[in-house]
Amino acid sequence: MFGMVLSTMHKKRSLESTILKIQSGDTELRNEIIHSFKPFIAKTVSSVCKRYITESDDEFSMGLIAFNDAIDKFTPEKGSSLLSFADILIRRKVIDYLRSQSRNQEMILDMGTDQDEGSSQSFLDNEKSLQQYEQIKESEKRIEEIQLYTKRLSDFSLTFNDLVKSSPKHADAREGAIKIAKTLMSDHEMKEFLFAKKRLPIKQLEDKVQVSRKTIERNRKYIIAISIILNGEFLYLFDYIKGVNNA
């Protein structure tokens, strides 16, 4: 058992180092990796479509694009594996594609084509099935994100209960704290300080934002919590930040 664990860890490190080489511009290695993971892509796409997918299907092409995108965006420091990250992007890409196809099909039906009643019902059943599947997977992914987010917060000695207590009460105050977090994460030096020291670079922030040190310190926990989300590995929680900004 211990040997299997070590083997898995070694493979993960090898894959991570390979991805870093690809991101540095090794096109030949990128093609090799994509080719070797085609079975993974096909399996993931098939699970979304609920039917066997081959390389000749348009859905597989969508999965291929998403996997390539995952290679470009993946960073080992985020904690999740490449395959876990790629799984999310592939599912989102394929679901978006299926939705676009469904909308096109709806337009055809509305225009009064020769589709028979059985075909129309089949389309409606498939659309309903897709929506149900998406809801289930989204719920699972949200739970996984919350669990990982809880772990990231604990690295800073924070809990969800801390966030409830320290979250700014007014919308403008929350928006201000989010802007501070965005400023922090856009600065490489401050970002490195935050994740290395596990505390806010308050002095540097004072020089970058137009708020007082007292305001930064008062919203310290909330700014850290938002910065963790902005680091890139929380796709669903990031929607919360967009929602606050649009409120």
Image (cartoon, rainbow, N blue to C red):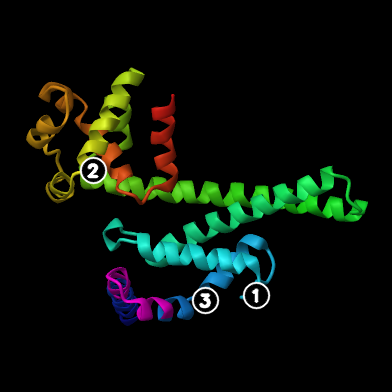
Question: Label 2 belongs to which residue?
Answer: 185
**Amino acid type of the residue that numbered disc 3 sits on in the rendered structure:** Lys
- What is the x, y in percent for residue 101? 69, 54
In terms of depth relative to the viewer, which is nearer, 18 or 112? 112
Q: Residue at x 86, y 56 (%)?
A: 119
Going from the N terminus, do you reach mark 1 or mark 2 first?
1
Report how far apart the C-alphas of labels 3 and 2 lie in the structure.
Answer: 35 Å
Report how far apart the C-alphas of labels 3 and 1 lie in the structure.
Answer: 12 Å
Question: Label 3 belongs to which residue?
Answer: 38
- SS for callout 1: loop
Picture quadrant where residue 10 is located:
bottom left
- 100 horizontally vs 227: left or right: right
- 122 horizontally vs 162: left or right: right
- SS for callout 3: helix
**Amino acid type of the residue that numbered disc 2 sits on in the rendered structure:** Met
Label number found at residue 56: 1
- 75 horizontally vs 99: left or right: left
Q: Residue at x 49, y 62 (%)?
A: 66
Density class for disc 2 (Cα within 10 Å; few <14, some 14-19, many ≥20) is: some
Going from the N terminus, do you reach mark 3 or mark 2 first?
3
**Amino acid type of the residue that numbered disc 1 sits on in the rendered structure:** Ser
- 90 horizontally vs 177: left or right: right
Going from the N terminus, do you reach mark 3 or mark 1 first?
3
The residue lying furthest to the left in this view is: 203
Q: Is residue 154 magenta?
A: no
Q: Which residues are magenta?
A: 18-31
